[in-house]
Image (cartoon, rainbow, N blue to C red):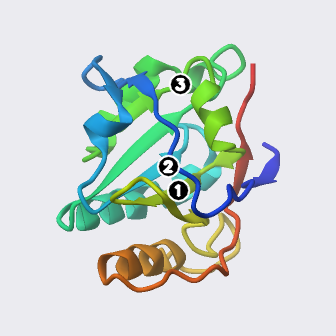
Amino acid sequence: MSLTESFMLPLGTDAPDFNLPNTVDNKHYNLNDLRGSKGTLIVFMCNHCPYVIHLIDPLIQTAKKYLENEINTIAISSNSIKTHPQDGPEEMKKFALNKNFSFPYLYDESQEIAKSYKAECTPDFYLFDKNLMLLYRGRYDDSRPGNNIAISGKDLHDAIDSLLKNKVISNKQYPSMGCNIKWH
């Protein structure tokens, strides 16, 4: 496990489109199929990363909470399954079903989508407005495995709440930290 910070894609960037398989229903989806009418949260994650595991249950609750406000969540795994077979499509499906995801869990086998978003770590969070323009990228909050800071989701929740209230989202945003994406 190599601790890596997110790249911090420039705010205002348009969300790169994709066409990826959802490991749960084996259907392909593009960004327009899955976007929320008020906003879209894209999370690069995987099954094995301790930083993802640390946040997964609160993240699932965040996705459910904001789905009611028409903010859709999309999870994408881009890890190489040559080095990390536990992050492959079958294991992703098991993980999503076991955790009862309310959002799709897409598999980016070519890693081209992770590269287009400049994703570097898991988890890596990107919040887009209704026009798919980037408003927030970075961390869920300042909790990490072993740092004894309670998980709050404050950073991400503040950004989503500001979006929903048509308030300006602070440009002071902190990178996410987690395991590096396992490139081919």
Residue type, label 1: Tyr
For the N terminus, the quadrant is top right
Query: Residue 146 sits in which quadrant?
Result: bottom right
Q: Which residue is mark 2?
A: 43
Which residue of the protein is positioned furthest toward the right in this rendering?
2
Q: Residue at x 30, y 76 (%)?
A: 164
Residue type, label 3: Asp
Distance between the alpha carbons at the discs numbered 1 and 2? 6 Å
- Secondary structure of the residue carrying numbered label 1: strand
Query: Residue 63 sits in which quadrant?
Result: bottom left
Nearer the camera: disc 1 or disc 2: 1
**How many labels, in total?**
3
Q: Position of residue 58 (x, y in %)?
A: 40, 64
- Secondary structure of the residue carrying numbered label 2: strand
Q: Which residue is mark 3?
A: 108
- Secondary structure of the residue carrying numbered label 3: loop
1 and 2 marks in contact (CB < 8 Å) = yes
Q: Which residue is mark 1?
A: 126
Q: Earlier in the sequence, mark 1 or mark 3?
A: 3
1 and 3 marks in contact (CB < 8 Å) = no
Residue in front for this viewpoint, 48 or 170: 170
Q: Position of residue 159 (x, y in %)?
A: 46, 76
Q: Position of residue 34 (x, y in %)?
A: 29, 40
